[in-house]
Amino acid sequence: MKHGIFSFLAAAIASLGLVNAASAADTAELRVLTHSSFAVPKPLLAQFEKEAGVKLRITKAGDAGEMLNKLILTRAKPIADVVYGIDNALAPKALAAEVLDAYNGPAATRTAVAPLPAPLVPVDYGYVTVNYDKAWFAKSGMALPKSLEELTQPAYARLLVVQNPATSSPGHAFLLATVGALGEEKAFDWWARMRSGGLKVAKGWSEAYYTEFSRNGGKYPLVVSYAASPAAELFYAKDKPTEPPTGSLALAGGVFRQVEGVALVKGGSQRAAAQKFVEFMRSVPVQQQMQTEMWMYPAEAGVARADVMKFAPEPAAFDAPAEKDLAARGADWVARWTRVVLK
Amino acid sequence: MRQGAAPLALAGLPLAFLLVVLVAPAVRLVAEGWPTDGHSLQALWAPWQDDYLRWRMVWSFLQALLTCAAALVLGLPLAWVLARLEFRGRSLVLRALMLPFVVPTLVAALGVLTLMGPHGVLVQLGGPDLQGTAWLLLYGNLFFNLCVVVRAGTDALEQVSASRLAAARTLGASPWRAFWRVEWPAIAPWLMSALCLVFLYCFAGFGLALVLGGQRYATVEVEIYTLVAHELQLGQAGVLALWMLMLTALVAWGYAAIERQLATPGRADRQPRQRPQGAGHWLLLVVALGVFMLICALPLVAIAWKAIISGAFLSSGEHAAWRVLLEEDTRMALWNTLRFSFSAVVLATVLGLAHALAARRSLALRTLVFLPFLVSPVMVAFGLLLLYPSWTGNALLLVCAYALLAYPFVAKSVASALDSMPLYYLQAARSLGASPWRAFWRVTLPLLAPALRRGVAFAAATAVGEFAVSLFLSRPEWATLTTLIYQHLGRPGAANLDAAMVLACLLMALTMGTFALIEWRGSREPDHA
């Protein structure tokens, strides 16, 4: 028993060594802040490190909205040099908080397929849409809804699950699409009628898709997700079917184009490397390979689409409120949504 | 007098830790958002004037209370069976009880829905679909918390003096009467201690219960989380967190006060476990194991079952789901899970032991053990960011955060054991000339061993689980198994779902292995104690 305490102390010291081994570094570090869905293949990141002569320190800070708040909260002493994942829905908040620095390099001046207000440099984009479970609709014999208005009718009651806009990016995006298309008053009237029709609210995308969506153990055959989700369903299917088990609906007023960007953090260090990272995110290899990692379309013009993306056709139309309305009223809309749908 | 100085010195370690990792960050965050225009008093009352928030607070309280009552009624028979009867698979049940702690919320929810969801077994048997009801929320609470009550009850029953029990029976008391007059008074403090933890856990509930019960049953903690993380309304969040702190601190203080009075030094003549005899024993065994299966085991079995029927382990093709186990990411996550949990558990053990030993005679210190459960974790997480921005990428801070949430388990468990520890052993050792340190090392610590193991097992489960993972900043190279599971569940597609299920099975197997290691010597100990 006597040597017990020594082995215990040795274990304690060793364990601190265990966790600290990772933080020792002699090359310069570039601190990258991202949301938790960031996924660029490791070989590409390693190549960047070699070419830029820095070590990447990527920090995942939760959902995009949560990440931006962490950036705003620490602006006096920034926790990153460059940030990826701020989208057009969050851009007004980021600009108002003045946490980003201007960048005028090639990536910022080249025309992108989908734009973002400067100083954000667009990297990728996708569409938040309503997805449906093909098997459920085939079995029930019901026709697919053709408009947001139809969703409020009794036949479609208790079929849709959405994410809470206060806690989820796609949920927030879907709310913005309805406000953009219908105007604030009519949009919240629609939400109120959806509520009486048994609209289901989940905390985030994963909860909605994996516990409420009828394809995965829930009972709601309609779920707010992305236009590219059916392509991902096919990509990750086990028995290689010829078409996806789900589809996306481009309902007028129910489509939001989400454009994600990268930007320099105000007060950050390693400026040269940070600028290289912005260029890197718009480089062709990243733009190609991120498609089947993050399931977004490339913002760089002329980049080849991944083969499976042909199952993710881009909706012809999408809606969003004007930027100045979003900046002025964005927070109120979320609060009003909570009052109308949850309280 | 030396006895008076030692606890103070011991208290310094956990108190300093709490100050640096918990109090300072939380205060810093509240200060950041505090209204400066003189409306602070008005803001303080605002939550009670808002119907929605008032209901949130009342509901948080109610559901926690209901869960405690249900956990006591369902957990006590199970604890008695595990402490008094010897049957095959007993130690397996004891360990499996704690698995709900480590399974990621979303995976657990999928397991529960397999049983009680719209396509679940219950519906197929003609029962109701429980998804989105308050019943499922309470079920979710029990799934996570039953183990806390059962493990404490089992340990407590093993401390009950066998000779007193025998005396009662010899004097003609029925087993039922003997239970009420001899066993119940002895185990009540332990159970109260466990129920207090359950209450605090449910009150600040965040995970499974919400996925299952839906947004309607959100607790105040969810409001705080939304206000801080997504809306950056630090003022409002601070006010709510303050009310939460006051309400929970009242519970913790009240408990700590009665705990001291309930504490009775036990005796070391333990009641040996016996094979079930007679219809009464068998009935109790069946009922208790039924409760265990229904509340704790079935959702986990459902997860394993889903992993198997998905063809995960049977098919051998290139796309078989079990292949996720061979991926480099999985190996890295496994290593991270091991090293982070191990570091956190070591730290939690040191802190917990020191706090429990120091708190023996101090009501304030006893109450402070609960502090990590009283302060809203999201406030702590954002406060740490604000107070120590340059430490955000440091693994040490992450380990401290893990340990913060894990160490009350060690402290509570050890404190209960200290309260019921027989005094005469220590007195004998001291009068035979042993130094205080030697007496502690040779007498106190061995007597504490079973409780320490239980606390460490819970601490390990907390560290492996998702509680801390989701709140604090993470780096890809620190991804644990839980993070990896959530990465898979962040994308559509059957292969991702299967991978998540297989990884959850790996996590459960790893945890069972860890528990076996922690309690390996414990399982043999009671025989010769």
Image (cartoon, helix red, strand yellow):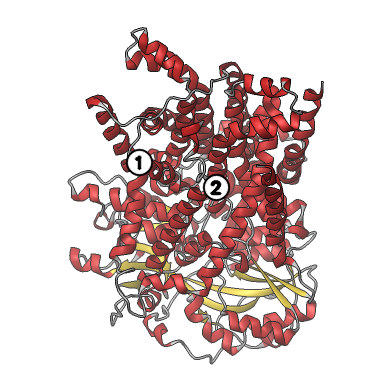
Quadrant (top left, top right, bottom left, bottom right) of the N terminus of chain B = top right
Circle 1 residues within 10 Å: few <14, some 14–19, many ≥20: many
Q: Residue at x 34, y 39 (%)?
A: B292
Residue B462 shows which numbered tag?
A: 2
* Nearer to the camera, B372 or B266: B266
Residue B89 x, y percent position in the rendering = 35, 43
The residue beneath circle 1 is B295
Q: Residue at x 27, y 34 (%)?
A: B286
Tell whether label 1 touches label 2 (CB within 8 Å): no
B439 relative to B192 in the view: left or right: right
Q: In the rendered structure, which amino acid carries the disc numbered 1?
A: Ile
Circle 2 residues within 10 Å: few <14, some 14–19, many ≥20: many
Report whether mark 2 lies on the same chain as mark 1.
Answer: yes
Marks 2/1: CA–CA distance: 19 Å
Residue A289 x, y percent position in the rendering = 52, 84
Instruction: Identify the chain of the residue marked 2, using the numbered disc in the image.
Output: B
A180 relative to B418 in the view: left or right: left
- Label located before the other in sequence (2 or 1): 1
* Nearer to the camera, B214 or B506: B506
Q: How many marks?
A: 2
Work out whether B187 lies above or below B86.
above
Q: Residue at x 45, y 61 (%)?
A: A205
